[in-house]
Amino acid sequence: MENVMSKPGVPFAGIVGQDAVKKLLTQALNSRQFSHAYLFEGPPGLGKETMAREFAAAIFCSHEKPPCHTCKSCRQVMAGSHPEFRWILPENPEKDTSLSVETIRGLIKDIYLKPYESDWKIYVIPQAEIMTPQAQNALLKTLEEPPDHAVIVLATSRPETLLPTVLSRCQTAVFRPVGKQEMEAWLQNRYQIDSHQAVKLAAFANGTPARAVKLRESESFQELRRQLLQLTDTLAAGNISPLLETGEFLAREKSQALEVLAMWQEWVRDLQVLTLKGETALLINQDQEERLRQQVQQLAAQASSQASPRESFQASGQRHDQPVILHLSQGLSNALLLLEQARDDLENHGNLAYVTEVLLLNLLDSFKRPTAAPAVQWLTPLGR
């Protein structure tokens, strides 16, 4: 999320949310007392890398109130060309899935050389979770005995993958999802869009600014959503053949499939809201309320064939039997688990066509046998 509007002399002004992180880093800038290692942790898309770059610019900036975004140092940091600023990536970022010990040894060799254009040298590892255990152990000694001129920023969405000894040497800054109203205001101010569009984007972004920006700029988003809605209609109808045919678009591209699965999780979450609460104000897909209600009725009809109704229960504006509601709710919970497992499998290099086909079949089954937990092996061979 590099496209931010910054204000000269106001650190991190263009980054939405993250007030606690901003306060921590601003205090360090004001005192010029920096930790030698920071851990930026939080879900993807919240601005960890942007914050790291802004932090570096403010440290290097020669103006009294940094960052100015106009001096040589600021411009070099933003362009990635500052001689004392390193962005640590795998040797082949397009192919390598890990950060090797050799790359970290290169960092270590460089970090002990004194800076010649600044008082500081700053290193950012934007995907710290991909460091191998050997790489982490190699970095550990430097974290324990860093040179006075060094600042290292580890950014990760998976801090549990880092060694406890590495974590203990870092000052932690936790990035959290942005509140809906704050996101709406930021979108309107940053992109000059109307309130209706801002509300819609903020709802779909689910607290993630990078996703809101991506959805705004994506020409394919509306088409993907249209195909997903058609797929959810087919699933609610409970027929296998048209379901597999309608779902073929999922197997075209991994990044597209991951985006659809994220939207689908939000859709199932809305179905669960209507099933248990019936409160439309809590819906993410508020423009599709009628469709959601219709699908709740269709899925409830499927669940009713598995339940033995005894008592009445009010949900989503209709009267259903309590066992039916419980079966449907369990089926929706299973569906959320299946969608999450599919996303994890794709991110771990599972075969796209296989994962999506198995997902569709298991989703259909989750409503026919809602009391059964999802039972599917997701970590499939790459060549399948």
Image (tube, rainbow, N blue to C red):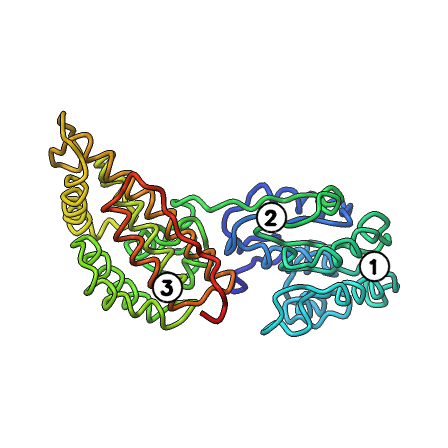
Q: CB under 8 Å between callouts 3 and 1?
A: no
Give the numbered dot on residue 119: 1
Q: Is residue 229 left or right of residue 151?
A: left
- In front: 333, or 282? 333
Q: Amino acid at mark 2?
A: Glu
Q: CB under 8 Å between callouts 3 and 2?
A: no
Instruction: Report crowding for label 2: few under 14, some 14 to 19, many 20 or more residues within 10 A (C-alpha).
Output: many
Q: Residue at x 33, y 63 (%)?
A: 357
CA gap between label 2 and label 1 equals 27 Å
Q: Is residue 144 left or right of residue 3?
A: right
Q: Residue at x 36, y 58 (%)?
A: 261
Q: Is residue 380 left or right of residue 92?
A: left
Under circle 1, the secondary element is loop
- In front: 69, or 262? 262
x and y percentages locating residue 290 in the rendered image: 15, 49
x and y percentages locating residue 191 in the rendered image: 40, 62
Q: Amino acid at mark 3?
A: Arg
Q: Which residue is mark 3?
A: 216
CA gap between label 3 and label 1 equals 40 Å
Q: Which residue is mark 2?
A: 41
Q: Farthest residue in the top direction?
A: 311
Q: How many marks?
A: 3
Q: Is residue 183 above or below residue 246?
A: above
Give the numbered dot on residue 338: none
CA gap between label 3 and label 2 equals 25 Å
